[in-house]
Image: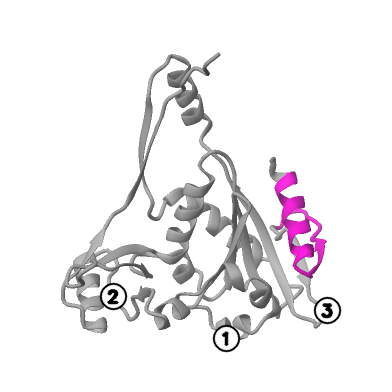
Amino acid sequence: MDDREVKEFAKEALRHFGLQVEDIPPQPGRKTPDLLGRFAEGETFLFEVKAKRDDPDQVEEEERALDQGEAYSRSIPTGSRNTLSGIISDGVEQLVSYLEVGDAFRLLWLQCEGREAADHRRRFQSTLFGIQEIIDMDDATHDSRYCYYFGNSEFFRHRETLDGAIIFANDEIQLCVNTLSPRVEGFRRSKLVQVLAAGLCDPDALEARGEGYIVDGDIDRRDKNLVIGHLAAKYNRPRLIFIDMKHHTVKMRVPRSE
């Protein structure tokens, strides 16, 4: 989809969830978000729509290798990405510039396109939440959980202005809650959270269920050993370690049998 098609898709999807959605007209010399949504009960939401697509140079390189009968392999970190930080920050700038609806919740619609849509989704999550995978070496099963706000995160950077993000990839939708927003409790009570509950990512709820860790407090996120020490003390798990995960893929085109 091109940008116009992505915006129209987001609009129809939000309408499917029960919102009354309208375009926000562009204003000369001023940035504006894309969509204004309201539930009949009166809750109001601003949405800026962004898309992440595959790198065309990488796609061309892959196709060239496959056409020549070669195996094509890639190894990509699943963590936070500067490119995605830029996309998120640009979207937030458009959201905060629109003051006509002062009580609206502000969200990004992040659409992941292409062959690597699932990878884009994981990296958007990591960039929003500063996610790091943590393993407990004292656990017999080497329990593995995501830790939220382990590293620098866009939700922390934009905590005063961004209430959440909807990530869409491969026909799956997830609503990510910015638990650092001062409006988080009101947002959790909103109808949008209720209708998207099946695809909700709320770190506080994950922590409460023993399915995730959270780093809180004024800690230098650039020092991973300091952060892991904070987690070990907070959760009384002295042998936690962090792992920088990568996604490995190998592709080869096999001729179809006659």
Residue segment shown in magenta: 4-30
Q: Which residue in the protein does label 2 denote?
A: 219
Circle 3 residues within 10 Å: few <14, some 14–19, many ≥20 = few
Among numbered discs 1 and 2, the one appearing first in the sequence: 1
Q: Residue 183 lies in magenta, yes or no?
A: no
- Taking the image as shown, residue 111 lies to the left or right of residue 137, namely right
Q: Residue at x 23, y 66 (%)?
A: 142
As drawn, the label of residue 211 is none
| Image coordinates for residue 220, horizontal then vertical, percent | 27, 71
Identity, as a three-letter code, of the amino acid under mark 3: Ala
* Horizontal and vertical percent position of residue 68: 43, 14
Residue that mark 3 sits on:
40
Residue highlighted by disc 1: 185
**Marks 1 and 2, how far apart at CA:** 24 Å
Residue type marked 1: Glu
State yes or no: residue 6 in magenta. Answer: yes
Callout 1 touching callout 2 (CB < 8 Å) = no
